[in-house]
Amino acid sequence: MPLLEIEKGFRDAALRGGNILLTKFLSDMKDTAPICPDCAIQTPMKKLGIRSKNIVSLLGEGTFSRMYFGCKCGHHSLPKDELLDIENTSFTPGVRRVVSQLAACDSFERSSATLEEVCGIYVCAKDVERIAEAAGADIETEKARQIEEAFSLYKEEQPVGLSIPVMYIEYDGTGVPVMKRETSGRKGKQEDGTAKTREAKLGCIFTQTGVNEKGEPIRDKNSTTYFGAIETSGEFGRRLYMEAVQRGMLSAVKVVVLGDGAKWIWIQADEHFPEAIQIVDLYHAKEHICDYIKYTFSDNDTRESKKEAWVALLEEGNIQELITEMTQYAGNSEEAQEELEREVNYFKENAKRMQYAEFKKQGLFVGSGVIEAGCKNVIGKRLKQSGMHWSVRGANAIIALRCTILSGKFNLFKAKKNQRNHKTIA
């Protein structure tokens, strides 16, 4: 017999034995009569008998018993379910945790298959979806509470000491394929003017303590956290502020907002981070120079010489001189001229955010590569797989779950939830 089959046999036997012990342990746990929450008179509810419950744990499927309580007012309770965090579900916290982590990384179908292969537990793809989206929804509920708390309390607080040398806040948008009903009435980039995607806004925060021997900035190890959702820019701005405050923005010496030239980015920066240093991503700015040159010059040698000269002006922060150079040329068509004017306006509107020589002198990052990579890794890698079409609710749940896991906060979130559950029982 192959060793693989022997291993699986021993694993299954160990799971069966452990499952018997677990269900017996759960059945033997003492049930305490709860106080009816609906009655003015605080008296314990009466025992109405024993009820069995089927569960799926990390040890497999099993059944345990618990006491059923009732009150004369009609309220009923199964306190052991609440204590064990299995109200209205047959999946234990351990199973839900593993399923959530798998589903945050891969499709629901493959997550189901991986769980069965690795753990010997079968959870169908639809249940994987339900569990993962419920976990993400819990995270979003907690985020909403934190946002309200941030705007009701934190803005009144003053920083106590200065402990973070530089904090960076980066954010951007990326399209997520959604179901047709989610794009009803929305304009898009399709030939008929319709949309197939909704924009997910993703943000990240990281810190910088110092520079290397060349004077180049170094991102602090394990300091990057992510957050995001399909929501309006105003809603996302509130999320931005809450996340920044939680990361210690009020005690940062410098706060830097880094992004591309999208207007909504800087509207939110002005509103929520008015004292921050604003920097337009240098590489996006270079792309705009290349686009301008493409519409203006046809000769390759001229294009290369202009690119070299204009990029040098850009990196030196001589934006006014760059604009003067650019406005000397006209497009060869009305469409081209409109494009040139848009490009020139891009540099006019962002001139203060393009003082790259000064920013580099301060040892600051001038590229938004972290959020660019985040859009691909956090959003694209999971939500843009072939054939996927999301509801906004489902996409936001997975985005919340994925951001929490990749930020290293999943254990913290589960711990806080458990603390709240036990406080409720007490």
Image: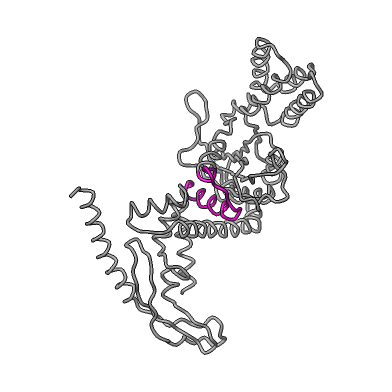
Q: Is residue 125 above or below residue 322?
A: below
Left or right of 24: which side holds 349?
right
Query: Residue farthest to the bottom?
Result: 72
Q: Main secondary structure of the magenta part?
A: helix
Residue drawn 37% across and 54% down?
Answer: 115
Left or right of 365: which side holds 327?
right
Residues in magenta? 382-407
Residue drawn 44% across and 55% down?
Answer: 411
- Total marks in image: 0
Query: Residue farthest to the top?
Result: 301
Q: Residue 31, image x and y in percent?
A: 38, 79
Colouring chosen for the image of the structure: one colour
Residue 163 appears anywhere in the view: no
Q: Residue 384, image x and y in percent?
A: 54, 43
Q: Is residue 232 above or below residue 36?
A: above
Q: Nearer the viewer, residue 119 or 25?
A: 119
Q: Nearer the viewer, residue 24 or 314?
A: 24
Q: Is residue 419 above or below residue 388?
A: below
Q: Is residue 307 above or below residue 228?
A: above
User: Would you say residue 237 sits in the magenta stretch?
Assistant: no
Query: Residue farthest to the left?
Result: 1
Please identify the quarter of the rendering in which residue 93 is found: bottom left
Query: Residue farthest to the right?
Result: 334
Q: Nearer the viewer, residue 312 or 63?
A: 63
User: Would you say residue 385 sits in the magenta stretch?
Assistant: yes
Q: Residue 285, image x and y in percent?
A: 66, 27
Residue drawn 48% across and 61% down?
Answer: 416
Q: Residue 409, image x and y in percent?
A: 47, 51
Residue drawn 61% across and 42% down?
Answer: 175
